[in-house]
């Protein structure tokens, strides 16, 4: 039975903690992690949770307790992971466009690092030479991902060192005796097609002979999760099998074996998360009925930023007949969560839940319109714990300095 919270549980949580409320279900994260480890069990693989998706300290600790490492995209995420008690060998810092000072700080922490520019690699080589084995993030020239905003491996992408610059890369490595232990790519998010991962490994396989110290091939994250009710699950075991076949026939047979690393974000935490909201106002403009909820793009920006679909259910009126609604937020600009969506008849005060809210939900939230960020709750083994209190008025003033 797939893990999920029932409508009754969600209503109880909304009654107890108030709305808007982010809820995360620990056992669902575990289920997802086990699908990854079981799917890839025939390969020497390691997983690092791309914590940019959700950085609450409790989530980091819980995911680490399952055996998973943490992938970071800023030095502050590295600090959060260390603060959560995660040992440095389980932390990976895959950088992008950062200052060299952050790389120096990461070296001091002793975490794994993937460097994504020739400029930083050169500075790294001058300072550390062969003393600190490091990874390089490459741009494989592969176009993949749910939409262009979340595609990162293509020829116009800012991410990584273009593979076309291999000679320059090798020059810097040789001149400074850098020990390259990892080749990394991340082609994008929302990828279901196994061939994208095989294409990635193919590109990297052609490069391994240039790096004698190589231990790890890191294929990044991007495993798609179902968002719409008719979406199918990504078949992890199928992807693993295809990768294994490729590796065995093209790489491992030449006497070189590597660990495979992955950095799943959405796959681990998207489906565990729920954003429970309440209907403030109903408005019938003659053409559409708007259900205006007590949330907005300040809490969940994905629909407006990526045209992302989030399934919505009216928790409060489950047996009523279905009608068509456009669900909007309370931000003073267009913030539509869903257009012309069938929902059980909505009344003011009803609880509406948005699904798949765990990944890039709270994490991308803001205080726009001076609204409070929601509280976060973790449900684990049947108990609910408040893991972040709702903002209060003082939080809006916290860093402001009155000078006039
Ligand atoms: N590794 C690297 C280097 C990444 O840049 C990312 C995501 C991941 C791993 C994790 O990707 P995932 O498994 O979550 O697809 N805010 C967007 C997604 C942006 C992803 C950025 N990088 C969204 O809500 O769809």
Image: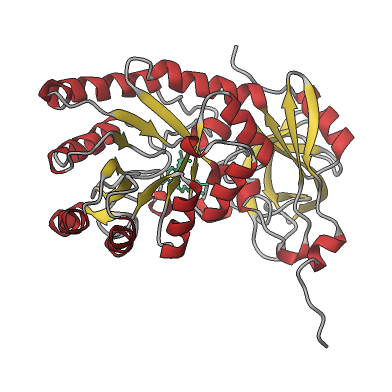
Q: Residue furthest top?
A: 1
Total tally of numbered discs in the picture: 0
In percent of the image, x 32 and y 64: which residue is there?
A: 123
Residue situated in front as seen by the camera: 183 or 146: 183
- Residue 54 picture quarter: top right
Q: In percent of the image, x 42 and y 33: which residue is there?
A: 223
Please report the residue visible at 74 percent of the width from the left and 51 percent of the height from the top: 295
Depicted 241 relative to depicted 189: above or below: above
In this orientation, which residue lies closer to the viewer: 226 or 168? 168
Looking at the image, which is closer to me, 5 or 206? 206
Q: In which quarter of the image is the N terminus?
A: top right
Among the 4 quarters of the image, the one containing residue 348: top right
Q: Residue furthest bottom?
A: 404
Please determine whether, in this image, residue 17 is positioned above or below residue 236: below
* Horizontal side, residue 22 vs residue 214: left or right: right
Image coordinates for residue 68, horizontal then vertical, percent: 51, 28
The reply to whether residue 127 is visible in this rendering is yes
State which quarter of the image contains the C terminus: bottom right
Q: Position of residue 293 (x, y in %)?
A: 76, 49
In the image, what residue occupies the spot 43% across and 62% down? 98
| 235 vs 266: above or below | above
Measuring from the top left, give residue 35's x and y in whole percent: 47, 19
Q: Where is residue 102 in the image (x, y as percent from the top left)?
A: 47, 60
Q: Is residue 319 visible?
A: no
Display coloring: secondary structure
Left or right for 239, reference 204: right
């Amino acid at each position: 039975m797939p893990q999920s919270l029932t409508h009754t549980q969600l209503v109880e949580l909304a009654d107890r903690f108030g709305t808007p409320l982010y809820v995360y279900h620990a056992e669902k994260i575990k289920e997802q992690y086990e699908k990854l480890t079981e799917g890839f069990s025939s390969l020497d693989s390691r997983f690092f949770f791309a914590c940019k998706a959700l950085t609450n300290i409790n989530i980091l600790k819980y995911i680490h307790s399952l055996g998973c490492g943490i992938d970071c995209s800023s030095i502050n995420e590295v600090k959060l992971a260390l603060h959560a008690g995660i040992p440095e060998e389980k932390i990976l810092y895959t950088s992008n466009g950062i200052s060299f000072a952050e790389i120096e700080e990461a070296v001091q922490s002793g975490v794994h690092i993937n460097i994504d520019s020739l400029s930083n690699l050169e500075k790294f080589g001058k300072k550390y030479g062969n003393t600190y084995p490091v990874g390089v993030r490459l741009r494989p020239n592969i176009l993949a991902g749910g939409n262009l905003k979340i595609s990162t491996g293509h020829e116009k992408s800012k991410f990584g060192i273009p593979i076309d610059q291999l000679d320059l890369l090798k020059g810097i490595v040789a001149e400074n005796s850098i020990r390259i232990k990892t080749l990394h790519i991340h082609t994008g998010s929302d990828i279901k097609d196994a061939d994208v991962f095989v294409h990635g490994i193919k590109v990297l396989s052609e490069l391994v002979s240039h790096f004698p110290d190589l231990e790890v091939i890191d294929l990044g994250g991007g495993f798609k999760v179902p968002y719409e009710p008719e979406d199918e699950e990504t078949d992890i075991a199928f992807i693993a099998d295809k990768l294994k076949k490729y590796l065995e026939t093209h790489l491992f047979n030449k006497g070189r074996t590597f660990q495979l690393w992955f950095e799943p974000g959405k796959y681990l935490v998207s489906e565990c998360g729920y954003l429970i909201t309440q209907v403030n106002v109903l408005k019938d403009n003659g053409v559409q009925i708007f259900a205006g909820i007590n949330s907005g793009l300040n809490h969940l920006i994905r629909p407006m930023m990526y045209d992302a679909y989030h399934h919505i259910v009216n928790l409060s009126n489950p047996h009523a007949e279905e009608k068509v609604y456009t669900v909007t937020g309370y931000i003073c600009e267009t913030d539509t969560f869903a257009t012309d969506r069938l929902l059980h008849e909505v009344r003011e005060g009803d609880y509406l839940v948005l699904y798949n809210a765990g990944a890039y939900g709270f994490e991308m939230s803001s205080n726009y319109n001076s609204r409070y960020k929601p509280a976060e709750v973790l449900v684990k083994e049947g108990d609910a714990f408040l893991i972040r209190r709702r903002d209060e008025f003082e939080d809006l003033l916290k860093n402001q300095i009155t000078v006039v």
